[in-house]
């Protein structure tokens, strides 16, 4: 089937298999490989992206379900001038990542979490990220990063929508 | 001012936080544009004979490039050696039987389902008890399922003769899954007489040599590249048979091939860790002196004897722990069972040693009615005894064990917590407090004499490039190595490039495991920098026409000059240009004389709901001393991650099989990988006791957190309910287990 999905501000139009997962659409069709796939049971959250501004695990959404909607991945998080999003800055400053595999999903889940609750307690952060596994950090510095981004006050701001040329993908 | 020991943020992060890392499945290289996708057909049987494989229907499916079986690949050689694909017999659920290559990723699952394998079921050997009976053999050509035995130390029955108290107990150090967030992955291309393999590995060079050996190829024609690796934790040491199959498929078909496993494959196919049944015997006097300790280990090696078979030799060597016990001994037997093979997982053999003795010491303390902290302090190896040779043959380099214990007890507020515990007990609260201690020592760079390599080049632009034999899976090697170069040469970190994990660029190396990187690979970088400095001094002396002795390197400016005369300054670029077209280069292989022995003390504070059995980790406080610290940001990160993985084993995680060898935890919906909501933030205390084994004075920190935390958390849970008469609860201390233990203890009273 033909789908048209706006990915990080650019329209991606493609003819895809009905069963194609959004995660594979993002990686293989849109060609954005930062979003990783870490499991096959919607357990790990590595594939978390924003769908119309809310976090979803893209391994559990069909590309077809995202037709006509808007996706944001970590590649689209920085500002147009390349300035990092506060959550990206906080993950760096607090050493909230090691191997980096869970990071794109963890960062997008954090953006969504802070949009819903801009001033969370540590416990709210921990419960809010319960669906995102990290095997390296023990979550300690991830939690610190989320709280630091919240303190910065802009953590919950949605990434600015940007006009970009339409892109055709096969 | 030296950059050593300062909080430098990682140079790796910008890439990982913007465009994401480039893991094997992310590679979009020209060589791989027409790669076929590999999908394995895996055994659904724990133990069976293969009586036939019919791949005709799969081969007829559109999009199928090839179906490969054992008949297409070199056969396994030894009586217990592991084939690339199962030939006549499968020995665990998930063992690879055939490999399907398809044009498209999604076609692979469809095609794999059409490969028809006929199995004749055999009686499964699902656990060590059945294996030891030897009624059914996994390898009929062998006489026994016992594949390795060993012994260490000087402890026998007479050792316990003078003891007031002797306690014996059999405990389980359960099988766990490493679960790096990136599973196993590989891609391979055969072109122009060379085989290139991209592999998610901790050791590209070992992987290269394994591929050469398994496929009968000359290692010279093989290039292995480790791109970004999404976590390893020991489970990505070298290369698994599955990725060798991917390489073989590319070699055989001439078509590039790529594979990245699903998590449900990973939990069956990637190695598991731990899996020991331990029986300890501990004896001592009523005033708290431990006189003898013996540990008997039965190691479950899984379906094939990989590293797991020899893993208990490390447990035996480290059985003594931090204690000065006159008589200590350990014996082990490794058996094969119809389960996933066991190999390295964060700590490999040492967490098992610590778990056993730290549990035994608590058991002993409970028996004589003495506080576990006091019993520990009474038996720790004293500082003046180092280097300390243990009865099991380890030579501990440096240690301040009592200082570590005192620091952690003070930090946690031990006396106050014991008082709070007493109040809750007196009131009969539902939520009871538990305090768990663990004092540990572990062995890092166990293969110190194998060494590690580094090549350092300062080029005509004044930039430095480090080619390191160590390999990174998130630890921050690039940051640490750049710090070492800046500190020694005054070339700023942002002008230092670090390259690892490419066998063409770095032909000779060992790679990363056993917390060896900084002390071996880092020392090699440091020595290479020192060598480059010596060469530069000679070149600069010629340029300035001064004697070498009169020259100094101004580290702040990165300039060579006559001592105290900045006007004579020469930049690194100038000196490197003068040195020749290759700049200034040093090749170093550093071998240490012996391993190092980091140590520490952990205290865990848990709350146990005595009505439901649920244990909640409230606090975890640690002293982890791994010698000098290069970058506290990185060491803290290693400690955090290690603590969490240890707590995970103590509280939640367990790979389980039913009586027929069917896995019950083959997805992340069933395997309880630890999550953020069940952990607290950790409280870390710094302590640095340098080693004299290497010039940096550093030991390894990668595994210490796990080794220390596991028994601390377990001991805390048991401590919470000990007043009810509970003396032991096996890991993981799930609500069900804790609740059952409380019930049994109450029934006995």
Image: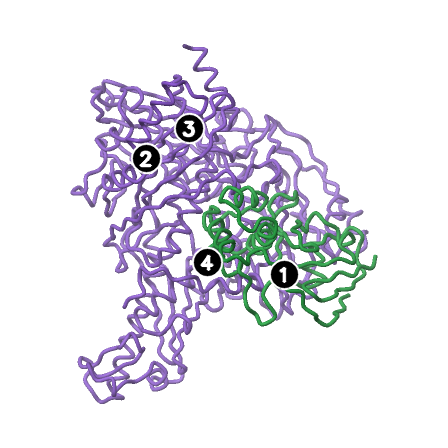
What's the chain of the residue with tag 3?
Answer: B
**Label annotation for residue A33:** 1
Q: Residue at x 28, y 33 (%)?
A: B153
Viewer-nearest residue: B22 or B681 = B681
Circle 4: element type: loop
Q: CA distance from mark 1 to mark 3?
A: 43 Å
Q: Which residue is mark 4?
A: B472
Q: Which residue is mark 3?
A: B717
Q: Is residue A88 above or below residue B654?
A: below
Rendering coords of residue B629 (x, y %): 31, 56
Q: CA distance from mark 4 to mark 2?
A: 30 Å
Rendering coords of residue B712 (x, y %): 37, 34
Rendering coords of residue B344 (x, y %): 46, 44
Foreground tag (4 vs 1): 1
Ranked by sequence position, the earlier of labels 4 and 2 is 2
Q: Is residue B339 above or below residue B689?
A: above
- Crowd tier of the residue under label 2, counting other residues whose Cα lies within 10 Å: few below 14, some 14–19, many 20 or above: many
The answer to which quarter of the image holds residue B350 is: top left
Q: Which residue is mark 2?
A: B319
Q: Quadrant of the C terminus of chain B?
A: top left
Viewer-nearest residue: A85 or B730 = A85
Q: CA distance from mark 4 to mark 1?
A: 20 Å
Q: How many marks?
A: 4
Rendering coords of residue B525 (x, y %): 35, 65
Chain identifier of the green chain: A
The reply to the same-chain question for discs 2 and 1 is no
Circle 1: element type: loop
């Amino acid at each position: 089937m033909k789908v048209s999905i706006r990915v990080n501000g650019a329209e991606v139009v493609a003819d895809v298999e009905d069963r194609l997962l959004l995660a594979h659409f993002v990686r293989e069709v849109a060609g954005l490989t930062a979003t990783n796939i870490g499991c096959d049971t919607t357990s790990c959250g590595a594939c978390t992206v924003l769908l119309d501004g809310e976090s979803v695990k893209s391994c559990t959404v069909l590309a077809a379900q995202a037709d006509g909607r808007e996706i944001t991945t970590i590649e689209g998080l920085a500002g147009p001038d390349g300035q990092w999003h506060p959550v990206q800055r906080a993950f760096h400053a607090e050493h909230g990542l090691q191997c980096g595999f869970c990071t794109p999903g963890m960062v997008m889940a954090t953006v969504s979490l802070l949009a819903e609750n801009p001033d969370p307690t540590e416990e709210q952060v921990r419960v809010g990220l319960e669906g995102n596994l990290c095997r390296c950090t023990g979550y300690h510095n991830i939690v610190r990063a989320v709280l630091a981004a919240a303190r910065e006050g802009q953590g919950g701001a949605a990434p600015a929508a940007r006009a970009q040329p339409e892109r055709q993908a096969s | 001012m030296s950059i050593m020991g300062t909080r430098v943020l990682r140079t790796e992060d910008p890439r990982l936080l913007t465009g994401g890392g480039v893991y094997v499945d992310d590679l979009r290289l020209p060589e791989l544009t027409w790669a076929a996708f590999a999908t394995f057909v895996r055994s659904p049987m724990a133990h069976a004979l293969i009586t036939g494989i019919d791949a005709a229907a799969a081969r007829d499916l559109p999009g199928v490039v090839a179906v490969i079986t054992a008949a297409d690949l070199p056969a396994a050689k030894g009586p217990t050696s592991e084939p690339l694909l199962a030939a006549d017999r499968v020995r665990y659920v998930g063992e690879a039987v055939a490999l399907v290559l398809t044009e498209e990723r999604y076609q692979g699952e469809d095609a794999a389902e059409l490969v028809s394998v006929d199995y004749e079921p055999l009686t499964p050997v699902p656990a060590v008890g059945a294996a030891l009976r030897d009624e059914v053999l996994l390898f009929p050509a062998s006489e026994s399922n016992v594949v390795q035995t060993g012994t260490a130390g000087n402890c026998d029955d007479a050792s316990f003769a003078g003891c007031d108290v002797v306690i014996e107990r059999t405990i389980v150090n359960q099988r766990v899954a490493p679960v790096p967030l990136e599973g196993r992955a590989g891609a391979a291309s055969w072109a122009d007489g060379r085989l290139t393999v991209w592999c998610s590995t901790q050791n590209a060079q070992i992987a290269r040599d394994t591929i050469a050996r398994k496929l009968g190829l000359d290692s010279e024609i093989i290039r292995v590249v480790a791109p970004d690796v999404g976590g390893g934790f020991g489970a990505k040491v070298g290369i698994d048979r599955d990725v060798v199959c991917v390489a073989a498929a590319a070699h055989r078909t001439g078509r590039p091939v790529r594979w990245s496993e699903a998590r449900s494959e990973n939990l069956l196919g990637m190695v598991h860790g731990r899996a020991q049944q331990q029986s300890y015997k501990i004896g001592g006097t009523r005033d708290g002196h431990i006189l003898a300790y013996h540990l008997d280990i039965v190691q479950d090696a899984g379906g094939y004897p990989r590293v797991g078979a020899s893993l208990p030799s490390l447990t035996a060597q480290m059985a003594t722990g931090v204690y000065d016990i006159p008589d200590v001994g350990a014996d082990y037997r490794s058996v094969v069972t119809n389960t996933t093979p066991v190999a390295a997982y964060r700590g490999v053999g040492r967490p098992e040693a610590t778990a056993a003795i730290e549990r035994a010491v608590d058991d002993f303390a409970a028996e004589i009615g003495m506080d576990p902290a006091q019993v520990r302090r009474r038996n720790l190896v004293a500082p003046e005894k180092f280097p300390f040779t243990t009865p099991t043959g380890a030579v501990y380099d440096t240690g301040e064990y009592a200082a570590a214990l005192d620091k952690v007890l003070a930090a946690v507020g031990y006396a106050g917590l014991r008082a709070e515990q007493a109040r809750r007990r007196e009131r009969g609260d539902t939520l009871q407090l538990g305090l768990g201690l663990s004092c540990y020592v572990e062995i890092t760079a166990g293969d110190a004499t194998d060494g590690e390599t580094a090549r350092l080049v300062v080029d005509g632009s004044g930039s430095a490039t480090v080619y390191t034999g160590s390999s990174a899976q998130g630890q921050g090697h690039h940051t640490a190595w750049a710090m070492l170069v800046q500190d020694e040469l005054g070339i700023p970190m942002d002008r230092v490039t670090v390259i690892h994990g490419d066998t063409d660029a770095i032909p000779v190396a060992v790679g990363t495991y056993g917390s060896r990187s900084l002390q071996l690979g880092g020392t090699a970088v440091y020595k290479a920098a020192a060598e480059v400095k010596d060469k530069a001094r000679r070149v600069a002396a010629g340029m300035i026409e001064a004697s070498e002795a009169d020259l100094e390197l101004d580290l702040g400016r990165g300039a060579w000059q006559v001592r105290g005369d900045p006007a004579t300054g020469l930049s690194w670029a100038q000196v490197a240009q003068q040195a020749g077209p290759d700049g200034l280069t040093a090749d170093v292989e550093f071998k240490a004389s012996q391993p190092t022995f980091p140590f520490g003390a952990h205290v865990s504070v848990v709350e146990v709901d005595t009505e439901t059995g649920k244990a909640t980790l409230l606090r975890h406080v640690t002293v982890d001393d791994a010698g000098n610290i290069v970058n506290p940001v990185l060491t803290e990160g290693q400690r955090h991650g290690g603590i969490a993985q240890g707590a995970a084993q103590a509280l939640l995680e367990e790979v389980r099989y039913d009586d027929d060898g069917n896995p019950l935890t083959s997805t992340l919906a069933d395997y309880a990988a630890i999550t953020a909501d069940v952990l607290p933030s950790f409280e870390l205390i710094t302590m640095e006791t340098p080693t004299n084994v290497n010039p940096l004075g550093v030991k390894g920190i990668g595994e210490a957190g796990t080794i220390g935390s596991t028994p601390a958390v377990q001991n805390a849970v048991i401590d919470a309910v000990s007043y009810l008469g509970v003396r032991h609860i096996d890991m993981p201390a799930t609500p069900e287990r804790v609740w059952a233990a409380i019930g049994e203890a109450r029934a006995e009273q």
